[in-house]
Amino acid sequence: MRMVALVNFQDELKKRTDEIESVIASYLPVEEGFAKTMAEAMNYSVLAGGKRLRPMLILETLRMFGGDENIAYPFMAAMEMIHTHSLVHDDLPALDNDDYRRGRLTTHKVYGEAMGVLSGVALLNFAYEVMLTAFDKADTQESQAYVIQALKVMSHKTGLYGMLGGQSVDVENDGKPMSREMIDYIYENKTSALIEASMMTGAILGGAAAEETATVEKAAKNIGLAFQIQDDILDVTSTAEELGKPIHSDEKNHKTTYVTLMGIGKASQQVKALSDEAVALLEGLNKKNEFLFTLLKELVGRRK
């Protein structure tokens, strides 16, 4: 499959990221009233920057199948809120106890620990309020059915049997030796589940058949695993300036990772194998989106 030229891709990536930023900003809460501080903390967290990978995967997967992009906008904004909520809570003293993320102070360092907890919960709840507005854009029974199906996927993949379940096992075993099986469970749920939810939501809203959505789910699982393993590698090989957050945090917190289990070399091989399989699965769908395929290739070779 022909990939988008790298120089043109970087320009296009910035353009599409800026467009997604505008979509996300349009759904943020208004900073007013007695709960103004919470709204400010929520917006501070969401507007901290980042790759906007997950909303981008929703949109680009939808484009691969076709369909109305407008119906995806609430899901794109909501996904970033859900992802941000997990980061806000990850940074708290009770978990990773990080002072910086993306080059600036974490939410609890600016607004206090209590507001860090509350604003994280508020982001998760507000995400569902936002997703429900997709029904306002669904003007046919078919599109309404797509929205319901996407909501089911988002709810499942972000909850006990997805992201939050993975986080709980990670926290419960923090600092303890872990098996490869347990690490895979954590990675498949804490990280892959949101990638799966994003790409599956895009496929569903784009009108993909059930078999096609299942293939997308499998590919997204591989992408999520590769993404997290690459994160492990960068924690050892990158710099704080490149990552925008402290390095060697896994070592500091005595975390078992793919790097500690098998070394950087084998971990890098695993990243390549997983990403290659993911692209092959998506290629087998015979759908076109060169930008999406290039994006997936770039993700696993990233330095930040």
Image: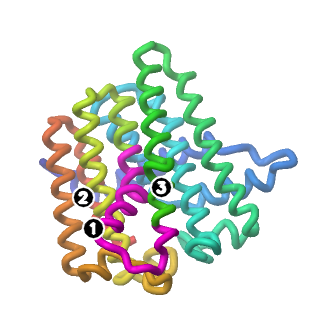
At which x and y percent is residue 228?
Answer: 35, 65
- Seen at 41% across and 25% down, the residue is 146
Is residue 299 at all visible to an observer of this figure? Answer: no
Please, what secondary structure does the residue beneath circle 2 have? helix
Picture colour scheme: rainbow
Instruction: Indicate the amino acid at tag 3.
Output: Gly
Residue drawn at the location 35% of the way across and 57% of the way down: 188
Looking at the image, which is closer to me, 286 or 257?
Answer: 257
Dot 3: within a 10 Å radius of its alpha carbon, few (fewer than 14), some, or many (20 or more) residues? some
Residue plotted at (35% across, 60% down) = 185
Q: Nearer the viewer, residue 50 or 235?
A: 235
Please name the residue shown 20% across and 68% down the image.
270
The disc, 3 or 2, on the residue closer to the chain's N-terminal end is 3
Which one is in front in this view, the residue at disc 3 or the one at disc 2? Answer: 3
What's the mark number on residue 301?
A: 1
Q: Which residue is mark 3?
A: 165
Count of marks overlaid on the render = 3
Q: Disc 2 to disc 1, how far (Cα)?
A: 7 Å
Residue 192 is a magenta residue: yes
* Mark nearer the N terminus (3 vs 1): 3
What residue does disc 2 label? 297
At label 2, the amino acid type is Lys
